[in-house]
Amino acid sequence: MTIPARADRVGYSGIVDLSAEAGTLRAEHHHAWGGASQNARWKMISSSRDPFTADNDYSYLRLRDTTTGTELFRRPVPALTYIWISPDLKYVVGLSHVMLWNPYQLVVFSKSGDRLLERNMVGTPGAKRSVTNWIYWYKEPVPKITIVENGATATLSVEDESGLPREFQFPAAR
């Protein structure tokens, strides 16, 4: 079986700022994938492959209460290209199509900042990718996303490029 690949002219080096709002919450993401941060990213990807450590000063996810201005959490994260807050304000979901030096393309946090899920989407059936930079696994620019809780478990559904749901289970927020 042959898997099509798209060539990359240069390595990804973007600087991205995203935000999403729901109710009284505002999620903000920033990542800088070029310049001075390259050494720190190289160290992470060539060793622990863990972008969630304090060594990650090049990419974060922050959640604020817009009524009080209080920062509820700020966490180091992989490069994200889409963020979403659940309608019940319990979860923040981050999606990414960045593959280069980015070990995870899906993260879920609770409102309190607990990381509940992280997933590498490389090798996922139906996902398309370029040689090094990109992986296309969710419908862009705005996928349909839902989270359904069933007791201690929650199921995240993210619309893929063909309009079908991709489902992921994780522990429900407390």
Image (tube, rainbow, N blue to C red):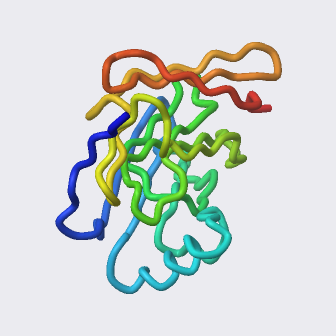
Task: Residue at 58% x, 21% y: name it.
Answer: 147
Residue 160 in the image: x percent, y percent?
38, 25
| Foreground pick, 105 / 133 | 133
Q: Which quarter of the image is occupied by the N terminus? A: top left
Residue at image position (52%, 55%) is: 61
In x, y percent, where is residue 120?
55, 47
Pick the quarter of the image with the C terminus.
Answer: top right
Q: Residue at x 29, y 70 (%)?
A: 13
Residue closer to the observer: 63 or 45: 45
Left or right position of 5 against 45: left
Q: Is residue 16 above or below residue 125?
A: below
Q: Residue at x 51, y 20 (%)?
A: 146
Q: Quadrant of residue 99?
A: bottom left
The percent coordinates of residue 66 (x first, y second) are: 48, 44
Farthest residue, direction front:
1
Give the left or right position of residue 71, taking residue 143 as reference: right
Position of 149 relative to 79 (above/below) = above
Say whether residue 6 is left or right of residue 144: left
